[in-house]
Image (spheres, grey):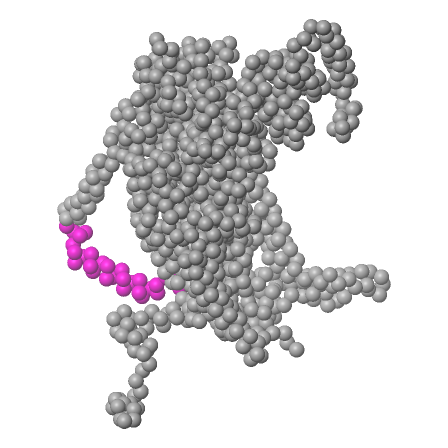
Amino acid sequence: MSTATTNPPADQAGQRKAPAGERVADWADGRLGIYGLAKANMRKIFPDHWSFMLGEVALYSFIIIILTGVYLTLFFQPSMTEVVYHGPYEPMQGIRMSEAYASTLKISFEVRGGLLVRQIHHWGALIFLAAMFVHMCRVFFTGAFRKPREVNWVFGFLLFVLGMFTGFTGYSLPDDLLSGTGVRFTQGAILSVPIVGTYISMFLFGGEFPGHDFVARFYSIHILLLPGIMLGLLVAHLILVFYHKHTQFAGPGRTNKNVVGMPLLPVYMAKAGGFFFLVFGIIAIISAIATINPIWALGPYRPDQVSTGAQPDWYMGFAEGLVRVMPGWEINFWGHTLNLGVFIPLVLFGLVLSLPAVYPFVESWITGDKREHHILDRPRNAPTRTALGVAWITAYFIGLVGGGNDLWATHFHLSLNAISWFVRIFFFAGPVIAFIVTKRICLGLQRRDRDKVLHGRETGIIKRLPHGEFVEIHEPLSPGQLHTLTAHEQYKPVELGPEVDENGVKRKISPVQKLRAKLSKGYYGENNQIAKPTAEEYKEISEGHGHH
Amino acid sequence: MSSQQIPEDNLPVVQETAHGAVEGTADPFADPGLPAHKPRIQDLDERAANRSERAVAFMFVLSMLSTVGFIASYVIFPVDKIVFIWPFGHVSALNFSLGLTLGFALFFIGAGAVHWARTLMSDVEVAAERHPIEAPAEVKAQVLADFKAGAEESAIGRRKLIRTTMFGALALVPLAGVVLLRDLGPLPEKKLRTTMWAKGKLLVNMNTGQPLRPEHVAVGSLTFAKPEGLEDDAHDFLSQIAKAALMIVRIEPDDIKDKRQRDWAHEGIVAFSKICTHVGCPISLYEQQTHHVLCPCHQSTFDLSDGARVIFGPAGHALPQLRIGVNSEGNLEALGDFDEPVGPSFWERG
Amino acid sequence: MKKLSARRRHPLAAVVVLLLALAATGGLYAAFAPAGKAQADETAQSLAIDEGKKLYTVGCASCHGTGGQGTTDGPSLVGVGSAAVDFQVGTGRMPAQQPGAQVPKKPVIYTQAEIDQLAAYVASLGAGPITPTDKQVDPAGADVAKGGELFRNNCAQCHNFTGKGGALTKGKYAPDLEGVSPKHIYEAMQTGPQSMPSFPDTTMPEQEKKDIIAYIQTVNGSESASPGGLALGGLGPVSEGLFAWIFGLGALVAVAIWVAAHTAKAKKS
């Protein structure tokens, strides 16, 4: 019979049956309320800028690490039980090693694709941390951490720190000679902690180092505890990104009250979704062509063996550098030993690392600004902040140089001792120099922007005037460019007010207030920012041009 | 200092009037608004759009082919096959082919999707309104009122006994979890102070497993030793060798500057702990011309001709020396344990 | 000869010429004066010693003294043995360009025959480690895994896990072992050149040295496998970190720029 006869009566009533997709969505909406969610988010707008994708690199490498990590757990044995190796890798035949090391050899040499997954996992981890680092730099230098995003900045900071320790514990799992040396270092550092050091060490390692427990313990920390916390923070981080809506750079049509860009569906679904595959693809290609952590060449861990060039992965290199260049201060008193040579770097590591976490609160205290900020600063327009950031990065990278001092020595034909001294001095001097230089550069760029607004763009075209004078033609900027270059706000430094009040009584000014005024002057005082051109100045000059 | 104390004029002018009011004439820096959308070639020329479509489809096909290649590589290449590929060297054929095919399979999905988005999806910029994160005043008032009502109904403010004991209970209960951690490991006691060395223990050559004799040890040579009776397959081998590992060198007795060191040596043969006093790396980069020994981890440098005192780097004290002698059979033996803890410093070291 | 002519005007050139003249005169005298007695037991060995002495006088005596007794510029060679000479001269370290704690490897300027003569002469100054035979250094049949363990115990602390070399104090370094011949590795272990301590047969028997050579050849030869791809110098996390930042993050940022960039607009005609 014809299909018409089997059609449901509803059709005849003018209500055609909904397509399958819609019916599924209806079903889900009735139970999950997805239409409400989709209404808010499906056409959510994301601004286009390459630096806004750095966080995505971090997000995607995190997902890649989880995927590959799950695969690795299928083969890895987190056990320190000693076995004698009888696998295919010739240079390890008959060598005693832990099951952890043996199973990592097995993943590398017997499981097809195991080596690739291991390398993706490890390259992914290095890139994850590097991507978080540059993402944080982007957020810092553009002032994206300001209200309302301070809490999200702290979440991101915690992700970075937890990422470091997740990386460290994972790096230690294969129980190879290099990572074991790193664990030994950690144990030595723990021992330097006053009063409780020996207890923590005994509890962490289940007795004396290395014992038979740390791989299993690091394993549950590495695959469960830390990634679990990170996953929670990550979800919170992303929810806040959605909730706050993305920041954007100043430009025509872009205000603090809107967000201009492309909708999630379809453009960012394709761009961001596609970017996941691009990131995964690139990490896979890197893992195809470059070795990482060839544990078979390192040998199993033994606390009486070592290799030169013993370094941690890059994200721990800063701590390593501090430890390497610290002078060997040790104090003995009342039957106790305070190993400052290790303990000071340990504390310094924590302090330097936590500076970025508190920075947003310090800056908002100095400015006293309680408004929301959705328009990003260009780094030049916040010279003091930019200079502080560069100073911090300088200290960080000088620490990294210290962490690799032996390799710098051999590859640049330098003396190890000279590099240590360089790091000792420049860990303090470098940030100061970087601060001054960066601030000068920022102010210079501000002046250039000012000139550009007032006098227009240098065209490079030279014109000879009738009386013989040569002038370069300056082309006035478009209204859009004029707006963009003058859209930033400039704070005025905090004034302490008169020393006496209206009744002639001396006002009390607390040291904290004085400090704040001083800092504020350092940020926004004379010579610390270049006043942007005013409309009057612009008019005066542009009308003046007309008189030519 | 709270924000209320900040004089209002220190705040920057708000965004909307960022350029200040210009009387009479229009602000030259005013926001001209979103520029008009300019079309791409694909928006105007259907043939260009078709070319883009083909490019996207081509990339998706490449991805499919790469996945097929991945499966083929998995089947074809044995796991242990090494091939020379310039410039990468002698690499695993399987790792190389799996990685590249997987990489391309993924990359071309992404590249296709992005190319699609960039050339064929609308590139009209859209502006969406932002709303303040802070709740409006009436919402805030409502929440505060609700909270107050709830708190009053619970009477937590009035019945202080309940409140205090509840906080007490909540504060105490985590202690159960802390107590449970006690069996993670033993207490330190004197474990870090002693090693396996004891009077009469022979010094066994790590290379040969044979007892060392004075005539074995030449000036300028480097040898490592372990205590007699510590076998590789012992359950606690690693924990013991972590403290007992020994570095043996021979220095002309006249070149030894430290008197105690000379007394504790045997004919210039000195035995120092191999474990760095900084954080415990096995230290053994012995420069036989200068008698300096360098730690490869953090570059502490010790002078083995002068009581192994620290001459550079972060270590806080000299390497412990083991007192050695020769037994009746002519083998080197320890004359006791180290007289101080080996390895990194700790609080109770003293 | 180029090297020599380049140094003609060196402040020490006159001293060298004087020493050469003195040595030549002395050598000639020594060669002719006791002729009657020497001819009787002249063997290939003593001939080699004589030839070696001539070479020594020209190339080595300025630093090591005319009789190998050593000067402030170079250590005594009495008792270093032929193995030390074969290593130092055979790897081009000697003659050194300048005295110092670290004399680097250079192109070899003597033939193996000349090196053997020099070695014979130096060995005649006092007993020391003898140049090993080819059979002694042949790693065939040695235990690579045992060699690896010995290497990690005795060598890796300076030369790195796979013998890529590493830093020592004050600009000194332990060199990369790639391409070093088994004989020279063996001799280095036996004699302890420069900063390196020796590992004499009494504490490290011949077979163990062979094992170590076999291990080095397996992991640090031109044919050594690096299954995972580029070995990045075999230096560990520092080069890996640099690679991740420069190539990994670099590629990803390049792609991000492409993803976020606005598509080219059609030109208005």
Residue placed furthest toward the front: C40
Q: Is residue B336 left or right of residue C135?
A: left
Q: Is residue C98 left or right of residue A167?
A: right
**Is residue B139 located in the magenta-colored stretch of the structure?**
yes
| Quarter where residue A430 is shown | top right
- The x, y position of residue A128, in whole percent, is 44, 51
- The x, y position of residue B124, in whole percent, is 51, 73
Can see residue B330?
yes
- The x, y position of residue B217, in whole percent, is 45, 16
Residue at screen point 78% across, 24% down: C8
Residue at screen point 29% across, 37% down: A81
- The x, y position of residue B2, in whole percent, is 39, 49
**Vertical side of B73 occupied by B196: above or below:** above
Residue at screen point 63% across, 57% down: A450
**Is residue A288 located in the magenta-colored stretch of the structure?**
no
Can see residue C77?
no
| Quarter where residue C66 is shown | top right
The chief SS type of the magenta part is helix
**Vertical side of A44 occupied by B220: above or below:** above
Segment tinted magenta in the rendering: B132-160
Q: Nearer the viewer, residue A206 or A499?
A: A206
Q: Nearer the viewer, residue B157 or A97?
A: A97
Quadrant (top left, top right, bottom left, bottom right) of the N terminus of chain A: bottom left
Quadrant (top left, top right, bottom left, bottom right) of the C terminus of chain A: bottom right
| Quarter where residue A246 is shown | bottom left
Counting the numbered discs, the total is: 0
